[in-house]
């Protein structure tokens, strides 16, 4: 049975984006942005595990056409997000019009990888049992955002992660932004929050600070990773997913934490300069690292 270098598990979503000028339907979700970004690198053995309704299978077929191995867990529905923006893009109302089935241990028994990245979108996508099970097969990476979103009557509410104390013991890589780290730890201080998450069991704590870069803590060193200043800001959707793609790709290839962080940051910058998933090359990423202004986080 094949052991992949890297496997992303998560729902591909159907996103309805409403602005004062248009209504657009497009696929989304961590697994969508991660898969389209990782396919730009031809030297890694990657697989995707997703769950979605029959109506969205065309998105899976498109990924398979790019030679990506995709396993689909049957689900009655796909996750369906509605994002409504006003004139100010920072003001967003979000609703979940449909939910897919959560991932189960039973479906994951045939999937083996050195690193599993769980792209959680909603609080019940992955149980602690799933995290524990996968940690017995490889290193587990988690984006915390979904664990802090609960759906009640189609509305999305910000919540703490009830099972965090048990789950974090099995998580090697955890990505949080400054808001998520405060919800999880109660601290708005980057170093304090990183210490706490490490104490709870996370081996590599990745804290993204938007345009101010990111900080990675491994229990010994605080790595200050710069943001590379984009030429223009076009579309920030999927930036965090793109960052994790670059980081885990480099770590799977034996690169250091600092090398992986810088590569991930440059990849995110190129993503934000264009709409849709990341479309660049390794050469583009290295050029960005060499030529675009670095903005280091202050902690």
Image (spheres, rainbow, N blue to C red):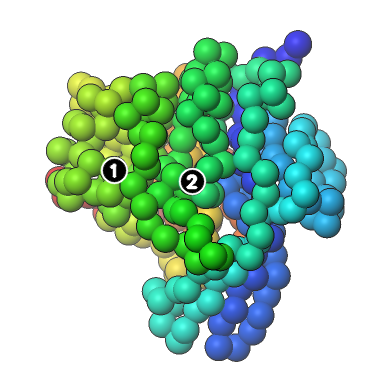
State the residue position of label 2. Answer: 123
Q: CA distance from mark 2 to mark 1?
A: 13 Å
- Of 27 and 266, the residue lying toward us: 27
Q: Quadrant of residue 259?
A: top left
The residue at the point 68 percent across, 75 percent down is 24
Numbered label tally? 2
Left or right: where does residue 227 sit relative to residue 273? left
- Of 26 and 163, the residue lying toward us: 163
Q: Is residue 135 above or below residue 266?
A: above
The residue at the point 21 percent across, 32 percent down is 196
Closest to the camera, between mark 2 and mark 1, is 2
Left or right: where does residue 185 sit relative to residue 259? left
Left or right: where does residue 135 sit relative to residue 1? left
- Locate residue 239, reporting x and y percent: 48, 54
Density class for disc 1 (Cα within 10 Å; few <14, some 14-19, many ≥20) is: many
State the residue position of label 1. Answer: 184
Badge 2 marks a residue whose secondary structure is: loop
Q: Quadrant of residue 82?
A: bottom right
Quadrant holding the N terminus: top right
- Locate residue 54, reporting x and y percent: 84, 51
Instruction: Please tell me which of labels 2 and 1 falls first in the chain.
Output: 2
Quadrant holding the C terminus: top left
Q: Is residue 262 above or below residue 154?
A: above
- Of 270 and 37, the residue lying toward us: 37
- The disc placed on residue 149 is none
- Locate residue 45, reporting x and y percent: 68, 25
- Locate residue 223, reporting x and y percent: 25, 34
């Amino acid at each position: 049975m094949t052991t992949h270098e890297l496997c992303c598990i998560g729902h591909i979503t159907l996103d309805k984006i409403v602005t004062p000028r248009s209504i657009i339907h497009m696929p989304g979700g961590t697994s969508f942005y991660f898969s389209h970004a990782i396919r730009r690198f031809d030297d890694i053995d990657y697989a995707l595990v997703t769950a979605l309704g029959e109506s969205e299978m065309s998105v899976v077929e498109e990924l398979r056409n790019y030679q990506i191995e995709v396993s689909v867990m049957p689900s009655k529905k796909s996750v369906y997000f509605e994002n409504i923006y006003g004139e100010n893009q920072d003001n967003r109302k979000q609703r979940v019009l449909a939910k897919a089935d959560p991932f189960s241990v039973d479906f994951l028994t045939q999937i083996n990888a050195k690193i599993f990245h769980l792209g959680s979108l909603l609080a019940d996508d992955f149980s602690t049992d799933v995290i524990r099970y996968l940690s017995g097969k490889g290193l587990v990476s988690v984006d915390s955002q979904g664990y802090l979103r609960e759906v009640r009557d189609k509305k999305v509410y910000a919540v703490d992660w009830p099972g965090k104390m048990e789950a974090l013991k099995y998580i090697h890589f955890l990505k949080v932004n400054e808001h998520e780290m405060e919800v999880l730890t109660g601290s708005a201080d980057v170093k304090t929050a990183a210490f706490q998450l490490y104490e709870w069991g996370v081996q590599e704590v990745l804290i993204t600070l938007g345009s101010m870069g990111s900080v990675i803590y491994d229990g010994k060193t605080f790595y200050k990773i710069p943001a590379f200043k984009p030429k223009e800001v076009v579309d920030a959707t999927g930036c965090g997913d793109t960052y994790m793609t670059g980081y885990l790709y480099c770590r799977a290839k034996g690169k250091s934490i600092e090398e992986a962080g810088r590569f991930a940051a440059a990849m995110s910058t190129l993503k934000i300069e264009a709409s849709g998933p990341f479309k660049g090359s390794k050469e583009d990423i290295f050029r960005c690292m060499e030529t675009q202004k670095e903005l280091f986080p202050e902690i």
